[in-house]
């Protein structure tokens, strides 16, 4: 029954669960268990993302259709639940799912939140009571719903968002490599001058890194396709129809456009989150690659006068509140921070993955939150890096040629001709005098200038092999 506030407006209503009565906001579509969770977990204001909640709703929809098909749920009730699932709006996802991420470790509060909202809407549609537990949650447990939602939401986020973003980044790097083909620069190891490379070689190394990261992520997808659903509380499938798991997977596959199947061992699927840990590890590897690329861009862009100054990243915003004219590599810095956050999320997921005590992992909500956050911010960063850094940077060829001409390490090419010791003497002399290595080599060897120009040609050196040989 609704209670009245001092101005006469309805402020809350009384709902009941197995523990007794609870006051629930009058406008809420959820019920007693959700309200208890709101009151019990005022921790962070972090909520499970909409994509995860949509996955749970998709699970409820497929379960209702499956149970109707199995003739264990009345057709009219199943249709009302399906209609309720389809009725949810973005505003509902924003307002009707208030449970904090840091809740019960099984995610029961979120599962019941969804059950209660759908039961409320379905009851209105059916004109009779639809039970959150007996009908919406039929043949299910929080213990198999939440792991299934982790797999489904992550699978969809990877396939629909992150992997296409990585293809976009790879294409951007490859296009820039083609555009700068033929430009030779000083290579660097230990941040010190090394033998020459082409700028295209440097960029294509980045592209190869991202391609391998993409392949690693793709290799994990088949394990995300295996679902815990049907195992119910501990993996035995108690209170679920024997044909539920297979039929459910088919329904959900058709609805979501992916290929899903029951886990080979539902006990393992419920008690562990090894696949989530694996995927997080692949995302961490991608984060490492993106940070490497971002930092390379920062170094190459450094200066523009007192640093390397090899490239100029797009000028996107003023870089200082006190130094006029300063422009900073903001996209590269943003990407590096995202990479750091993903590495932190991986640590969280790793620790949480160890919390599979006996038949249930009890850190499921934080795994879901952290994994999907990593996918989301990596997706955005990959596109930003492609569009606002790599595609738009310009090359200072004159600066590269000047540094290359003065690079004493070019003398490495003379090792097969004059020996390492003599080459080292030439390099030291060139360093000390600040002269090009070619000039010093003319004085310190019997080789002609023409021979030395051929041997020390930076473009030739970037192709590898033994100079003057094979």
Image (cartoon, helix red, strand yellow):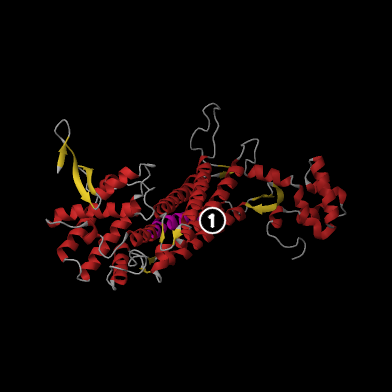
In the rendered image, which quarter is residue 135 located in?
A: bottom left
Please say whether residue 328 is visible from this viewpoint.
yes
Up/down of 259 relative to 365, above or below: below
Determine whether the residue tagged by mark 1 lies in a helix, strand or loop: helix
Give the labeled residue for mark 1: 285
Looking at the picture, how far across and down is residue 247, in whole percent?
29, 71
Looking at the picture, how far across and down is residue 442, in whole percent?
84, 49
Q: Residue furthest bottom?
A: 243
Looking at the picture, how far across and down is residue 153, in whole percent?
37, 57
Please say whether residue 447 is visible from this viewpoint.
no
Q: Report the magenta residues as a range.
A: 154-171
Quadrant where the N terminus is found in the figure? top left
**Within 10 Å of the Cα at label 1, are there few (<14), some (14-19), or many (20+) other Cα atoms?**
many
Q: Residue at x 17, y 62 (%)?
A: 77
Q: Residue at x 55, y 32 (%)?
A: 326
Residue 165 inside the magenta-drawn segment: yes
Residue 299 inside the magenta-drawn segment: no
335 and 114: which is toward the camera: 114
């Amino acid at each position: 029954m609704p209670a009245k506030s001092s101005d006469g407006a309805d402020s809350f209503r009384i709902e009941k669960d197995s523990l007794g009565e609870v006051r629930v906001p009058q406008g809420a579509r959820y019920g007693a268990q959700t309200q208890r969770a709101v009151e019990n977990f005022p921790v962070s204001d972090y909520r499970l993302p909409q994509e995860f909640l949509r996955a749970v709703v998709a699970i409820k929809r497929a379960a209702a259709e499956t149970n109707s098909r199995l003739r264990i749920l009345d057709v009219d009730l199943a249709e009302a639940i399906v209609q309720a699932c389809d009725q949810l709006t973005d505003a509902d996802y924003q307002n009707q799912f208030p449970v904090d991420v840091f809740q019960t470790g099984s995610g029961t509060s979120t599962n019941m939140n969804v059950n209660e909202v759908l039961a409320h809407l379905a009851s209105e549609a059916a004109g009779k009571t639809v039970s959150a537990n007996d009908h919406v949650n039929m043949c299910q447990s929080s213990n198999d719903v939440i792991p299934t939602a982790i797999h489904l939401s992550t699978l969809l986020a990877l396939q629909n968002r992150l992997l296409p973003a990585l293809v976009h980044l790879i294409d951007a790097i490859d296009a820039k490599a083609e555009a700068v083909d033929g430009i030779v620069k000083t290579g660097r190891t230990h941040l010190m001058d090394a033998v020459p490379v082409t700028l295209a070689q440097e960029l294509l190394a980045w592209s190869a890194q991202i391609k391998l990261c993409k392949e690693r992520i793709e290799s994990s997808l088949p394990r995300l396709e295996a679902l815990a659903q049907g195992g119910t509380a501990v993996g035995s499938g108690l209170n679920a129809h024997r044909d539920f798991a297979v039929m459910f997977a088919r329904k959900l596959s058709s609805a979501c456009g992916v290929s899903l199947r029951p886990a080979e061992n539902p006990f393992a699927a419920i008690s562990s989150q090894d696949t989530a840990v694996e995927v997080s590890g692949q995302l961490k590897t991608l984060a490492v690659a993106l940070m490497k690329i971002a930092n390379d861009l920062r170094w190459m862009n450094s200066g523009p006068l007192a640093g390397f100054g090899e490239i100029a990243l797009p000028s996107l915003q003023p870089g200082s509140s006190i130094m006029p004219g300063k422009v900073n590599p903001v996209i590269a810095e943003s990407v590096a921070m995202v990479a750091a956050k993903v590495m932190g999320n991986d640590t969280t997921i790793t620790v949480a993955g160890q919390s599979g005590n006996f038949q249930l992992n009890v850190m499921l909500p934080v795994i879901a939150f952290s994994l999907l956050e990593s996918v989301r911010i990596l997706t955005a960063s990959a596109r930003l890096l492609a569009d606002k850094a790599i595609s738009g940077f310009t090359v200072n060829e004159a600066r590269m040629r000047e540094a290359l001409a003065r690079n004493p390490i070019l003398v490495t090419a003379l090792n097969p001709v004059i020996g390492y010791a003599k080459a080292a003497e030439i390099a030291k002399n060139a360093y000390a005098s600040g002269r090009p290595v070619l000039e010093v080599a003319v004085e310190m060897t019997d080789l002609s200038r023409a021979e030395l120009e051929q041997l020390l040609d930076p473009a030739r050196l970037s192709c590898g092999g033994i100079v003057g040989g094979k």
